[in-house]
Image (cartoon, helix red, strand yellow):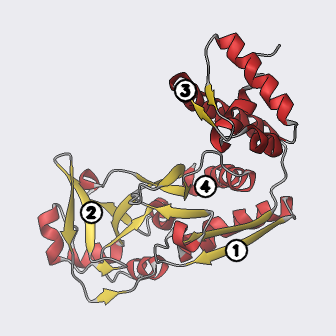
Amino acid sequence: MSRWSGLDEFVAVAELGHFSGAANKLGVSSSHVSRQIARLEDRLQTRLFYRSTRRVTLTEAGQTFLQHCQHLQDARDEALQAVTDLSSEPKGLLRMTCSVAYGEEFIMPLVNDFLQQHPRLRIEMSLTNQTLDLLHGQFDLAIRLGRLQDSRLVATRLAPRSMYLCASPMYLEHHGAPHSLSELPRHNCLIGSSDTWTFLESGREIPVRITGNWRCNSGRTVLDAALRGFGLCQLPDYYVQEHLRSGALRSLLTQHQPPHTAVWALYPQQRHLSPKVRKLVDHLKDGLGARAEYL
């Protein structure tokens, strides 16, 4: 006799409070449930239920045993599902969100590749610079940049992300380069979505309020303004690396460069991740890792 025999019957009776209900749930006869419980009690050498004409209730030993059996059932079902999902085809609707510029340039081409490989899948992407609530908005997945705030979500790191303070040689020729954080207020700073930049000083992250005569909540337009010599900018690596290599931009105050953050895939807390989300996250991680910006 299997050591698992009787566990499903025991849990069903314990949760429903009677043998007939457990039998209906499991699709077997009441006599079968009764026999399985009796054999289980014989193996354990203890009584699991108090029986009456109308209802059965758990003994103290039964209450303890129920908690362990429920965990065993969950672990068994999850193990079986995990193996099944290895060969499962992603299908159905997958709703996701990402910031506009990063989504257009980096994420959507990879999502489109994934959709070509899995035509039974449907994608709904919301590109927005607002931080949408995944749980309230019923999103399966979000791509977030930088530091994470929502502890209710599970995060998988997709790629690194470093911030650079930069300026063009043209700007530096006319205005000079800052040599300390205290000199930043003397410079024209190109303001993007925030007028506070983060730096590292004495091992601590510190915010620095910046000012300037130019502002736009688009990283690409900030980059264009910096290349034209309008002022200093602080942008992520994927905007500026090409221009740092070519000399069109120069990195400044490298000793104060803030610690690396990351590009993250976020999804709601679940015991078992669906195949469509898990496989898409793996695809995004591999695809971003192959790009020149992250090599």
**First-in-chain label (3 vs 1):** 3
For the residues labelled 1 and 2, the Cα–Cα distance comes to: 33 Å
Residue under label 1, please give it: 124
- At horizontal 27% and vertical 68% (from top left) the residue drawn is 197
Q: Quick check: 148 left or right of 271?
A: left
Kindly identify which residue carries mark 4. Answer: 292
Indicate the position of residue 225 as horizontal and vertical percent values.
40, 83
Q: Position of 142 compared to 215: left or right?
A: right
Label 4, label 3: how far apart the Cα atoms are: 64 Å
Q: Circle 3 sits on which residue? A: 59
Query: In the image, residue 74 lies at what x, y percent?
Result: 65, 37
Crowding at dot 1, Cα within 10 Å, few <14 / some 14-19 / many 20+, comes out as few
Mark 4 or 1, nearer chain start? 1
Per the model, the C-alpha gap separating discs 2 and 3 is: 60 Å
Q: Earlier in the sequence, mark 4 or mark 3?
A: 3
Which tag is nearer the camera, tag 3 or tag 1? Answer: 3
Mark 4–mark 1 distance (CA, rounded to whole Å): 27 Å
Of 87 and 9, the residue lying toward us: 9
Residue type of the residue flagged with mark 4:
Ala
